[in-house]
Amino acid sequence: MMDEKFFIGLLALAFVKATPITLGALTGIYSERSGIINIGIEGTMLVAAFTSFIVSVVSQNLWVGLLGGMLAGGLVSLLLAVLSIRYKVNQIIAGMVINLLAIGVTNYATRVYIDTSGIAGIGVLPKWRIPLLMDIPILGPILFQHQPLVYFMFGLVVLTHYVMFYTPWGLRTRAVGEHPRAADTVGIPVNPMRYASTVIGGLIAGMAGSFLVVEAVGSFQKMMTTGRGFIALAVMIFGRWNPFGALVAALLFGFAEALGVRLQLGDINNIQALVYLTGLGMLLGGTIQMITDFVKKKETRSKIIAGMVAITGLIAAILGQTLTFPPTVIPFQFLGILPYVLTILVLTGMVRGAAAPAAEGVVYEKQ
Amino acid sequence: MTTSVSPLSRLGHNLRQTLGNILIPILAILTSLVVVAGVIALSGANPLEGFMGLWDGAFGDGDAVANTIIKTTPYIFAGLALTIAFRGGMFNIGVEGQFFVGSIIATLIGYALRLPPVIHLIVAILGGAIGGGLWGAIPGWLKARTGANEVITTIMTNYIILRIINWLISPNGGPMRNPARPLPQTPEVYPTAYLPWIDFSKINFPWVNLSWLASATGSLHWGSILALIMAVIVFVLLWRTILGFEIRTVGISPTAARYAGVNVERTMVTTMALSGAMAGIGGAVQVLALTHYFSTGFNVGYGFDSIAVAMLGGLHPAGVVLAAVLFGAMDAGATIMQMRTGVPIDIVTIIQGLVLMFVAADLIVRQIYRIRVKPADGTTPVSATVQTAGESG
């Protein structure tokens, strides 16, 4: 049943599932903080996944494959940057060009180069068990027994936060995204900054795509990104264009995806698990909201709503743990919907236009 | 433009502009084909042979032309759906999902209800329109109420509806499954709901006589005619009605529209509902005219491709019809091309992506071919969407 082992397994899986989404969100943060909207993350990841597979098979080395995937991601993002900056293409259309081309090129190349030769993958990267830390009860198995890219993801979140908010380079990038005219006036090269930031983002999207091949699946499958690049955008918005915010949001999605995968095993009563976990989530979210409301001295109404959410959650969690539910299996198609529905809920729950870089999507032209 | 110009020079200006509007898409297509020729050559096949196969499969004989028209039809509906949405400043990437909703609702009405002929067909198509319209209105409503970015929400609705439909038609207990078949598909609709083939021998009026095409009877369905009618309706809607004026005003500048007294939020929802309804009709037509049952996989891909159709068509119904013919021809010809030269049909998606790129990035095309005709001043559709992106993105 839902014991300690169940939760440890679920949370560990949530971190794995959150990894490509977080990386994708970091991609979005780099390009959008500099003022370039990146709808093409999905396509960038897809091309990177394909490239990392081919390169890893040819070189017989997964790390070289990862490198190849990242370079491919950088190149695809360079195309996005050239279309958006040099040719002033509407950035949403430019992103869709990337997505459409990525589907076409990878499907075509899969038929021509993979299906015909029947080449197989060379496995996935082994887990890095961190000595000492992995033995910590509960936290050890959740956090410190993962494959390398999960740790890289954590590292990149910290690094991105540092670069964006504590270095001159990050300050310039943000200036270019918020007020390019002012940035230009003080001598910051607007468009070169945008190129650099978008391509760096592309390298990270390349890592996200490669993750699917060199850590998750071990081979390339057509359309294997299944919307993660788009979910990453929602995660970026939910995280208010901040790396740590994106990580927290991505964990929410990772958890939803992990839960969908875990419940399909069928050894747990699906309804009971959903009632119980939703209750826990509401309790946690409501409590956190209430505490922040008190700290920030928000209006009473907001506190009451948060409190009611928390209490409803508590009741649901207790009911979920004590009641006996008729054995029900939710069709797996519905469990797979969870992350997508969550994306829509998250986007609608956001305050209008919250914290988006002001000059996002606007071509900068010198006067 | 505030500068005064003589009527004659304005005429010349308009002519040059029209020429530019047609020239750029054509050059964009040519450039895409050149690039793709390189891709085909890389894979070891002969590009010329490939293109010959593509042409023969699309226009080689009567059957090929009929096939092209059949493949063109869904692109017209999808391209029109995007024209409405883009003109209204809504980036509806969810056309594929709305198309599916139209298909599945029309199928449900087709096999679950017993109605007299013609009425059954009309109810099924209307059902598809309403279904697609409601499914499209959801992201529109969310955007109007909460500002949720419609690009992402429409993509999410695609994934959601695909999974719901997979469950509906799943052979393992799906409520809409065909119990007689082990495959994921619905039962067949009653013949009363069929969208019939065109009987050319019966079209014999003084003003239009098509009986000479009698041998083509059974190769084209009425859905293609419906698509053309819809193109006219969309033109009238957008450029000859108040609602259309409001949609386009919101598309160009929501702020200006608000000052002018337009209910921007309501217009956003209406735009998405109309766009979804158009896609829904397209989905309904595919089922009622061709397959007569629903299974996933038979019409995947119209969502993203139709963005290219709409952009290539200059977000104008007439242009969309022409662009749809091009895409329909490529779809129809791809099979013959693959049979003859082994070039996979997926090459078509690459061509479509490149066409979208070169049409959107018309500056590239202008540079390659050294065209000096200026783009129209903020009135061309592409630049119109550029403006809205700045405001709504």
Image (cartoon, coloured by chain):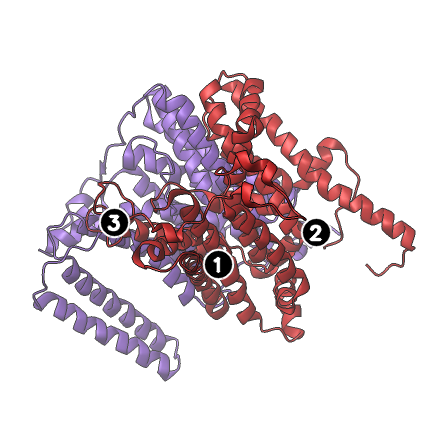
Q: Quadrant of residue B121?
A: bottom left
Which numbered disc flags the more N-terminal residue, 3 or 1?
3
Q: Amino acid at mark 1?
A: Ala
**Distance from Cα at disc 2 to Cα at disc 3:** 47 Å
**Distance from Cα at disc 1 to Cα at disc 2:** 25 Å
Are circles 3 and 1 on residues that touch, CB within 8 Å? Answer: no
Residue B374 position (above or below residue A61)? below
Task: Tell which chain the image draws in red.
Answer: B
Q: Residue at x 59, y 60 (%)?
A: B88
Closer to viewer: mark 1 or mark 2: 1
Task: Tell which chain the image draws in purple.
Answer: A
Residue A222 position (above or below residue B304)? above
Closer to viewer: mark 2 or mark 3: 3
Q: Chain of mark 2?
A: B
- In the displayed structure image, the side of residue B305 where residue A115 appears, left or right: left
For mark 2, what is the residue?
A: B380
Residue B215 position (above or below residue B179)? above
Near-viewer residue (B288 or A307)? B288
Q: Secondary structure at mark 1?
A: helix
Q: Amino acid at mark 3?
A: Arg
Image x and y of residue A302, in percent: 36, 79
Q: Residue at x 17, y 64 (%)?
A: A276
Q: Residue at x 8, y 68 (%)?
A: A322
Which numbered disc flags the more N-terminal residue, 2 or 3?
3
Q: Secondary structure at mark 2?
A: loop
For mark 1, what is the residue?
A: B277
Question: In which quadrant will I find the C terminus of chain B?
Answer: bottom right
